Amino acid sequence: MTGIISQIIEGPVSSEIDVAVNGGNVISATITHGSSEKLHLKKGEQVSAIFKASSVIIGIS
């Protein structure tokens, strides 16, 4: 699934990456801070989200 990075919240250990996808939905991913730096992620950049079944968390509001 492709989308545009809408927000990056960096922490000392992990970073939250928000990706805006079709329909106004946002996918949030938590990755290590080191991985965020290695990927050189930037707000506004197009990225692809890939799901690993054992790592998906779904919530409702």
Image: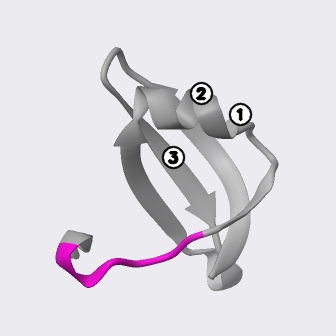
Would you place residue 52 above or below residue 42 in this image? below
* Residue range of the region highlighted in magenta in the rendering: 49-54
Q: Residue at x 59, y 27 (%)?
A: 37
Report the side of 5 relative to 31 (left or right). Answer: right
Name which residue type carries label 2: Glu
CB contact under 8 Å: marks 3 and 2? no
Image check: 46 left or right of 1? right
Q: Which residue is mark 2?
A: 37
Q: Is residue 53 magenta?
A: yes
Q: Are marks 2 and 1 in contact (CB under 8 Å)?
A: yes
Work out which quarter of the rendered image holds the N terminus and state it. bottom right
Outermost residue to the top: 12
Q: Which mark is residue 2?
A: none
Q: Kindly report which numbered mark, 3 or 1, lies closer to the viewer in this rendering.
A: 1
What residue is shown at x 36% (from left), y 47% (from top)? 30
Q: Is residue 42 above or below residue 58?
A: above
Left or right: where does residue 19 sit relative to residue 40? left
Q: Secondary structure at mark 1?
A: loop
Q: Position of residue 15 (x, y in %)?
A: 42, 34
* Residue 61 shows in this picture: no
Q: What element does badge 3 sit on?
A: strand
- The residue at which mark 3 appears reads as 17
Q: Is residue 52 magenta?
A: yes
Q: Can residue 49 be seen here?
A: yes
Q: Amino acid at mark 3?
A: Ile
- Mark 1 — residue? 40
What element does badge 2 sit on? helix
> Quarter of the image containing the C terminus?
bottom left
Quarter of the figure with residue 60: bottom left
Residue 54 placement (x, y as % from top left): 18, 77
For mark 1, does the 10 Å Cα neighbourhood hold few (<14), some (14 to 19), or many (20 or more) residues?
A: few
Crowding at dot 3, Cα within 10 Å, few <14 / some 14-19 / many 20+, comes out as many
